[in-house]
């Protein structure tokens, strides 16, 4: 009779999970925790009490769609009020024109469901970046999930098909880039330039990133780092980042444009000064 130890030795050993994931297609086809979290967030958005219509609870989406369709039809951004009954033709600026074009194009391709689906994907990606960033920082998985769920849950009042959903996602991604640069300096920080270039024309929330950059520089000054980070070096370079902050289709003396330029210049000077102090 063959001993049990011999039989066990003859059995083919089951591949470990690391061995399975060493294959490219396995990494692509086997869902990760982030994939499952993304799908769960998406399902939660569309399978709630009110379903996908909850993302349409704000009436502003209507004029965002119509403005986007106007830009698609006329190949230019509007400079006059398109909707006012009391002040027709008054000066007006579609500062979120790129979001308008996205919503207008989606509406023509797939109706309101296409707009809502895109908004839902952006929100789910925002939620996923939160938990991914915490795990990347070494946070316990269960703690990361709990904090991510609490953060996403507290943000639900803002979960609407409107331009600010792009700020939720881009702010989370941009902060992650800054944190990665603070851990290890690399050229990845330069991705902030194209991100801000697009973000400026999606939603005015890009100004929050200026404040975040100032906080990052101030914190580095307090810690008395031995050398300015790639972030500070890039801001000292000035023109590329400033172009990203201030880029818009409206080159006018309007007070909002002047305010944006002034804030960008002020933040640039403050962070440059912080770099000199450190």
Image: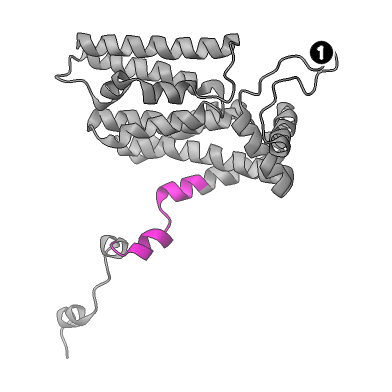
Q: Residues within 10 Å of mark 1 (few under 14, many from 20)?
A: few
Q: Is residue 123 above or below residue 249?
A: below
Quadrant into which the N terminus falls = bottom left
Within the image, what quadrant is residue 54 found in?
top right
Q: Is residue 28 magenta?
A: yes
Which residue is at the front of the view, 83 or 157? 83
In the picture, measured across the screen, residue 189 lies left or right of residue 47, that is left
> What residue appears at the point 71 percent right and 43 percent down from the top-left corner?
107
Residue 96 can be seen, yes or no: yes
Q: Is residue 57 magenta?
A: no
| Colour scheme shown | one colour
**Helix, strand or loop: magenta stretch:** helix
In the picture, measured across the screen, residue 54 lies left or right of residue 169, that is right
Within the image, what quadrant is residue 242 found in?
top left
In the picture, measured across the screen, residue 247 lies left or right of residue 98, that is left
Which residue is the extreme one toward the bottom? 1
Which residue is at the front of the view, 60 or 51? 60
Quadrant into which the C terminus falls = top left
The segment highlighted magenta reads: 22-38
Which residue is at the front of the view, 246 or 54? 246
Q: Is residue 94 above or below residue 276?
A: below
| Residue with the mark numbered 1 | 87
On the image, the x and y values in percent for residue 175 come to: 38, 28
On the image, the x and y values in percent for residue 136 come to: 31, 38
Residue 147 can be seen, yes or no: no
Q: How many numbered discs, if any? A: 1
* Circle 1 SS class: loop
Q: Is residue 77 above or below residue 112?
A: above
On the image, the x and y values in percent for residue 226 come to: 14, 19
> What residue appears at the point 30 percent right and 21 percent down from the top-left corner?
237
> What residue appears at the point 43 percent right and 38 percent down from the top-left corner?
129
Within the image, what quadrant is residue 98 found in?
top right
């Amino acid at each position: 009779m063959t001993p049990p130890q011999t039989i066990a030795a003859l059995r083919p050993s089951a591949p470990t999970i690391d061995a399975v994931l060493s294959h490219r297609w396995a990494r692509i086809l086997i869902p990760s925790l982030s994939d499952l979290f993304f799908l769960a967030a998406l399902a939660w958005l569309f399978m709630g009490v009110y379903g996908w219509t909850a993302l349409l609870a704000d009436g502003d989406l209507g004029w965002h769609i119509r403005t986007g369709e106007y830009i698609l039809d006329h190949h230019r951004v509007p400079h006059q009020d398109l909707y006012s009954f009391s002040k027709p033709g008054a000066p007006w600026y579609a500062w979120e024109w790129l979001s308008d074009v996205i919503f207008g194009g989606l509406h023509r391709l797939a109706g309101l469901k296409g707009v809502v689906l895109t908004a839902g994907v952006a929100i789910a990606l925002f939620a996923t970046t939160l938990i991914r960033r915490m795990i990347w920082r070494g946070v316990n998985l269960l703690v990361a999930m709990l904090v991510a769920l609490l953060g996403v849950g507290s943000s639900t009042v803002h979960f609407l098909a409107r331009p600010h959903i792009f700020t939720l996602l881009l702010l989370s991604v941009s902060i992650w880039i800054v944190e990665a640069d603070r851990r290890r300096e690399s050229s990845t920080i330069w991705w902030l330039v194209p991100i801000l270039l697009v973000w400026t024309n999606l939603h005015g929330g890009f100004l929050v990133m200026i404040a975040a950059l100032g906080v990052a520089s101030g914190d580095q000054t307090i810690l008395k780092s031995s050398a300015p980070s790639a972030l500070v070096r890039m801001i000292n370079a000035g023109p590329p980042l400033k172009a990203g902050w201030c880029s818009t289709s409206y080159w006018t003396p309007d007070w909002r444009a002047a305010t944006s330029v002034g804030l960008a210049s002020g933040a640039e000077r403050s962070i440059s000064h912080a770099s000199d102090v450190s």
